[in-house]
Amino acid sequence: MGRLFGTDGVRGVANADLTAELALGLSVAAAHVLAEAGTFQGHRPTAVVGRDPRASGEFLEAAVVAGLASAGVDVLRVGVLPTPAVAYLTGVLGADIGVMLSASHNAMPDNGVKFFARGGHKLADELEDRIEAVYEQHRTGEPWARPTGAGVGRVSDYAEGFDRYVAHLIAVLPNRLDGLKVVLDEAHGAAAWVSPEAFARAGAEVVTIGAEPDGLNINDGCGSTHLGLLRAAVVEHGADLGIAHDGDADRCLAVDAAGEEIDGDQILAVLALAMRDAGQLRKETVVATVMSNLGFKMAMEREGIALVQTAVGDRYVLESMKAEGFALGGEQSGHVIVLDHATTGDGTLTGLMLAARVAATGRTLAELAGVMRRLPQVLINVPDVDKSRVSTSSELATAVAEAERELGATGRVLLRKSGTEPLVRVMVEAADIEQARAVAGRLADAVKSALG
């Protein structure tokens, strides 16, 4: 069996790859593993379980709740809430486990199971590996130790979770949003009710699109992966800005008043300056991945802000932030982590903070995002090559060195092997798009020649 856990929990086609049996078994295994680790010692364990609106989330939630309760864990069902809300409630309620059922930006047939540890933090890799091993051990025949009588878990709904999370979002905002008109695209997802409520309570005039989830329409032509509707709505309504979430609302992209996209790098740049000016950017440092646009790096250097870069994936950004005590990090895709207020990317919080900066400065979002210029970026996937030799091939190293000499200080080359496929990704940035395309094409040919 291949590893079930990816970089963001277990995902697959619901009722095909991700079955009720798998969700139940993983939940029981998680309870046993955390009990063995001493997490439950001295008290009766509690879990917080939430989901996005996917139809399959209904039966998967039932399976997860049944598995946890059968293992002696009391369960608080919080219903449809964003992933960061489940993480927040896991921490603030002192729960031992948090579980979110969502496949984020994936299409509706998919779903996923993500576990949080006490405090609302993602589980460590070694704990995920142990859960997977214990699940497999018992799936193939070894019986579980099962509590009976008063030892089984009790299940209750925690309706207060919605208001508690929204109140938290409002409490951490630096200023109100009075006078702003904002369009929110909720992707027919987990933030369909939370995000409009939070923006309205903060004082904004709110227009919503993609806020009518029916279990089947999540991410369907809307949200952070499809910005066309939001661009049009912002212009149509004469709004100051637009905010787009993905299905579980752990990310956020934006649109300025003219309908132009503001990506995760630009959002991170705006928030870095806002936090620096407020004295909240610890060590004057921001964390991003190696895929961040070179324009972001150049803007941070110009502003005197240090940049730490990690491997691609918000979990690696978070690991660096926690290890070094940094306050802000994120990805080009819109995962932004403000560690003083959240343990994971939080799209609603990010959107609120971005709007708060617009309101506080009186400047347009386009003006604020102008702190950085996005350099043209070309990405080519080169399939069917020996990706294991990407860092050892002398022929490829020579080609990369030549490309870097040609691009100079205003360009960049990055070669990355895929984590799941036999291919190498060639990324080139340059001040001129035609130069970026030409260099990327030559490097793609070099990858084929050297590794094919």
Image: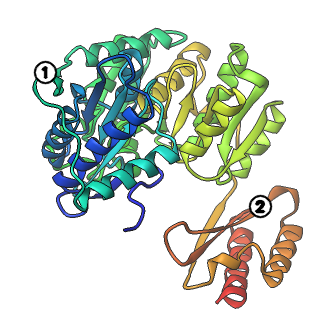
Foreground: disc 1 or disc 2: 1
Which residue occupies 72% across, 16% down?
277
Residue 95: x %, y % from top left: 35, 21
Residue annotated with mark 2: 412
* SS type, badge 1: helix
Q: Is 77 placed left or right of 170 in the picture? A: left
Q: Nearer the viewer, residue 60 or 444?
A: 60
Q: Nearer the viewer, residue 264 or 101?
A: 101
Precedes in sequence: disc 1 or disc 2: 1
Residue 51 position by quadrant = top left
Which residue occupies 18% across, 53% down?
21
Quarter of the figure with the C terminus: bottom right
Count residues near mark 2 (Cα–Cα under 10 Å), then give few for <14, some for 14-19, many for 20+. many
Residue 270: x %, y % from top left: 63, 30
Residue 379: x %, y % from top left: 60, 68
Residue 410: x %, y % from top left: 82, 56
Is residue 337 visible in the rendered image? The answer is yes
Q: Amino acid at mark 2?
A: Arg
Is residue 8 visible in the rendered image? The answer is no
* SS type, badge 2: strand
Q: Amino acid at mark 1?
A: Ala
Q: How is the image coloured?
A: rainbow
Residue annotated with mark 1: 150
Q: Nearer the viewer, residue 194 or 21?
A: 21
Quarter of the figure with the N terminus: bottom left
Count residues near mark 1 (Cα–Cα under 10 Å), then give few for <14, some for 14-19, many for 20+. few
Q: Is 69 placed left or right of 200 in the picture? A: left
Q: Residue furthest left?
A: 149
Residue 156 position by quadrant = top left
Q: Nearer the viewer, residue 25 or 4?
A: 25
